[in-house]
Image: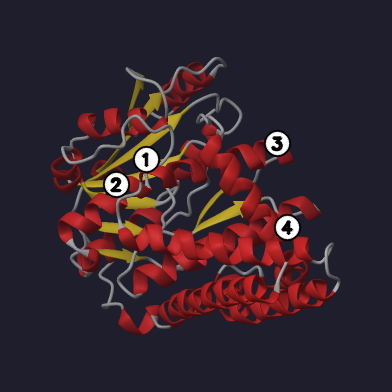
Amino acid sequence: MNPETLDILMNIILIFSGLYILCIGAFTFGIYNISSNENIRNDKTDKKVSILIAAKNEEKSISKSLQSLVNQSFDKNNFEIIIVDDNSTDLTFEVVLEFIKRHPDLRIRLVKAEGCGKKQAVAQALHLAENEVIMVTDADCELPPRWIEKTVGFMTANDLKMVLGPVLLSPCGTFFEKIQVLEHLSLIASTAGAAAIRMPVMCNGANMAYDRKSALEVEQYRTDMNIASGDDIFLMERFSKHYGSRSIKFLMDEDAIVKTQSMPDLKSFFRQRRRWVSKTKVYTSWKIIVTALVVLMFNFSVFGLFAGGFFHPAFFLVYALFVLMKFMVDYPILRKITDFMNRRELMKWAFPLEFVYPFYVVFTAFSGIFLKVKWK
């Protein structure tokens, strides 16, 4: 490689590095200022809630999720649960029926999916919902007792159209589980920080709430229903365009942390991540597109520096310096979110993970874009 070409490539890498620093710096500023920007919460409300759950082959976990709804502090007369069984091949439907029989005091509706996939199931549940506030979670989630109360109170006090909530992977025992949790926490931190600076670019369908009438209104503008993934982010994207980014906030409250299961093995982990990446092909929000592109290109640049080391050993040193720089940029936001989630012990894995992360990003990005994916 001649010096002129090398100079051009290094300038490109420096440009994307600068953009990455600005992006993560902005998210860090946002997450550290969430508490001071929030209105005073009003946890008492007479609003009624519909909780939507799409379930597919969740016979082992859905009872625990439903039990956590039984334990809610929110008045049981003021919420309903709508479960759409998405063509399960196990005993999910029968398990839910048995749970309904044991809890006649809860209003639970169980229906078979008319379409295929989580997005279609959630959309079906939305049209069955009768209450003004919609809350969405997954069939394998454990919900804290004040989840409904805190979320609805926050939504009401701040006059929001959509609330994004914190999600924590669990369990966190093995090394594989620990690095999953830490990686996922980085996404939640970016979700919180981005929303705080009125630039929502991410969300998690395991913990969301929104106004039902508004969701039905924006549904007519959605063009993503044929995409297997993205029941959450495409809806958020449409809310942001239709009602403005001020109508969306992240609820950073310990009583709103939803726990969901970490992936049991590498195969399922990468399948999930590829599914997340696959939806990037049809994003229309420039904020989401630019953020995703900056993160991808910066990590691709770091990956390229490592590969370049096989042709010129000096690149290995440059690669190590960029990894160190990335760690210094990522550290404050990771420290904030691990403290909030009571997972500070995971920070000891943050620096080693930085060496692996560029390879993981590049692999999942390209495989997610070019390989066919499905929900389950």
> Relative to the observer, which residue lies in front, 329 or 258?
329
Name the residue at 78% across, 72% down: 315
Q: Is residue 352 left or right of residue 76?
A: right
Determine whether the residue tagged by mark 2 lies in a helix, strand or loop: helix
Query: Gap in Å between the C-alphas at discs 3 and 4?
Result: 17 Å
Identify the disc placed on residue 231: 1
Query: Gap in Å between the C-alphas at discs 4 and 2?
Result: 30 Å
Determine whether the residue tagged by mark 4 lies in a helix, strand or loop: helix
Reading the chain from its start, which is encountered first: label 3 or label 4? Answer: 4
Name the residue at 34% across, 37% down: 52
> Relative to the observer, which residue lies in front, 163 or 75?
163
Residue linked to disc 2: 235
Q: Please, what is the three-letter code of the amino acid marked with disc 4? A: Lys
Q: Tell me if residue 224 comes above or below residue 208 in the rendering.
A: above
Query: Gap in Å between the C-alphas at discs 3 and 1?
Result: 22 Å
Q: Position of residue 169 (x, y in %)?
A: 60, 52
